[in-house]
Image (tube, grey):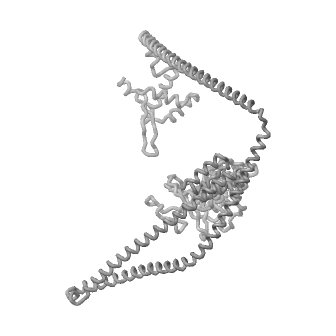
Amino acid sequence: MQRDFIWLWVYEIGFAADNSRNLNVDSTAMTLPMSDPTAWATAMNNLGMAPLGIAGQPILPDFDPALGMMTGIPPITPMMPGLGIVPPPIPPDMPVVKEIIHCKSCTLFPPNPNLPPPATRERPPGCKTVFVGGLPENGTEQIIVEVFEQCGEIIAIRKSKKNFCHIRFAEEYMVDKALYLSGYRIRLGSSTDKKDTGRLHVDFAQARDDLYEWECKQRMLAREERHRRRMEEERLRPPSPPPVVHYSDHECSIVAEKLKDDSKFSEAVQTLLTWIERGEVNRRSANNFYSMIQSANSHVRRLVNEKAAHEKDMEEAKEKFKQALSGILIQFEQIVAVYHSASKQKAWDHFTKAQRKNISVWCKQAEEIRNIHNDELMGIRREEEMEMSDEEIEETTETKETEESALVSQAETLKEENDSLRWQLDAYRNEVELLKQEQGKAPREDDPNKEQQLKLLQQALQGMQQHLLKVQEEFKRKEAELEKVKDDKLQVEKMLENLKEKESCATRLCTSSQDSDYPLEKTLNSSPIKSEREALLVGIISTFLHVHPFGASIEYICSYLHRLDSKICTSDVECLMSRLQHTFRQEMTGVGASLEKRWKFCGFEGLKLT
C-alpha cells in the first residue's frame, strides 16, 4: 500500500453555549497517511455503501484555497478522509458530506447520505451528557475515549454491558460535536466479525448533575440581576432627610438657639414643625413651644425687609440698565449720523464702489440695531408709566382699605393678646396646682433624711475616687515590673546567643583537627563512587556508551540497565553520571522540536585532564 505523509493544519470546531457556532483555527502540525484510493473503494463496497471521493479534491466550493501551503500538493479541506476530526459547520442550504474517520484502533464509516438524519430527543437544559448506543460488543472504554475525546474533554464515562454508554463532557458545545458522529458505522481494526462492528447512535441524555449545574448557574445569574437592580435603585433613590430627634428640654433649648440664628432657621423650623405634628405639645411644654413659635414669628419682619432690599436692588439695576441703554442709543445715533454724512455727494464721489457698498451695508446694520434698542427702551418706559398709573389707582383704593383694615387688625390683635394672656394664666394655675400637690404628698420630716442621703452619697463618691487612685498606682507599679522583666529577658537572650556562637566555634575547631588527623578518610569519603554497585554501573554504562559514539538519552540507557536489573532507578543513574564529569558528558542534540539531551562517554579525554 502506498503512503504519502502530508503536513496538515487542522480546523477545530467550537460551539458556543448559546448554540452560536464559531470556527477557530489550530495550527498544530500532524502527519497523517493518505491511503490508496482503490483500497478505500474496496472497503466501502464491502460495507454495501457507495464509494466516496478521497483524492483530496476540495468538496466545499467556497473553501479557502490558501490552506494548501506546501508546493506540489492540492488544497485540502477539513472534510478529507483520514483527518479524524469533526468538520466545521456547513450552511443549511448545502448538503452535508461526511467522510471516513480513522482512529488508532478503529475506523468510523459515514452513513448513507440519502438516508434521513438520525432522530434526537429534545435537548434538556444545560445538557453536557450524551447517550451512545450501537457500540460493538468487543468495544472497550479506551476505544470510546479514543473516538469521543476529539469532541472535547471527557469528565466521566458510564459503560453498560448492553453495548451502550453515557459520556459526560466538560462544556455544552462539546455535545453538539458528539452528535455529529451519530449514524456512523464503527469497525474495530480490520476485523469483519459482528462483535467488532456496530452503528453509533448519539443522543441527548438527561443527567441530574447537568440539571443541578444549570439550575445553580441560573440562580447565580438571577442573584446577580437582583443585585444589579438593587444597586441601580439605590443609586437613583433620592437621599433621605436626616431623622428628627425626639423632644426633650435639652433639644428644645438647642432648637430655640437655632431659631434665633438666620443661617440655621430653616432647619430649626422643620424640627419644630415635626414636634408639633407628633403631638409633643402638652401643658408642661406649652410655654416652651410658645416661645419657639414667637421666635419664629420674629423672622417675618426680617424676611419682609430682605424682600424690600431685593426690590430696591432690582429698581437700581433697572435704572442703571436704562441709563446704559440710553447712552448706547446716543452713540448709535452718532454712528448713523456719520454714515448719513458720508453718503452725501460731497464725500460720496471720492469713495470707490467697494467702499460705497461697505458703507451702505454698515449703515443699514447700524440702523436696524438702533431701532431694536430704541423699541426696547420705549417698552421699559411704557411699563413704568403703566406701573405709575396702577399705583395711583391702587393708592386711592388702598387708603380707604387701610383705614378699615387698620381698625379690623387692631381688634384682631387685641383678641389674640387677650387669648394668649388667658392661656398663660391657665398654664400658671396648672403649674401651681401641680407644685401644691407635690408639696402636699412629701412631708416636711423628709428634709433631714434627704440631707443624710446626700451626705452618704458624697462619702460613697469619695471612697470610689480613692479606690480608683489606688488601682491606678498598682497599674503603674505592675507596668514598671513588666518593663524590668522584659529587660531581663533581652539580657538572657543575648547571653544565649553568645554561648551558641562559642559552641559553633568549638565545633569548627574540632572538625578542622579531625580533618588534619585523618586526610585519607576524607579523600575516601569525598570520592564520587560510594559503593561497589555504583562502580559496576559505571563500567556497564561506559561500555554501552562506547558502543554508541553519538551518545544516548537517559531513557535509552535505563532501558538497557533494566534488562540486567529492574530495580535500578533512572534518577539514581542520572545523579551518578552527573557526579562523574570527567567520565560522562551531557550534550544537546537536534533542532527545534527534535531537541533532546544525550550522554556521551568522555573517559579517554578526562584521563588526560586529570
Residue drawn where x is 55% and y is 18% of the image: 485
Residue 2: x percent and y percent? 52, 55
Classify residue 76 as left or right of residue 235.
Answer: left
The answer to which of 375 and 200 lies nearer the viewer is 375
Classify residue 203 as left or right of residue 42.
Answer: right
Quadrant housing residue 374: bottom left
Residue 101: x percent and y percent? 60, 57
Quadrant housing residue 219: bottom right
Q: Is residue 237 above or below residue 542?
A: below
Residue 185: x percent and y percent? 67, 58
The answer to which of 491 and 285 lies nearer the viewer is 285
Q: Is residue 585 above or below residue 176?
A: above
Residue 477: x percent and y percent? 57, 20
Q: Residue furthest bottom?
A: 345
Residue drawn where x is 55% and y is 77% of the image: 394
Q: Is residue 370 above or below residue 51?
A: below
**Tally of numbered tags:** 0
Q: Is residue 497 above or below residue 561?
A: above
Residue 196 in view, yes or no: no
Classify residue 351 as left or right of residue 79.
Answer: left
Quarter containing the N terminus: bottom right
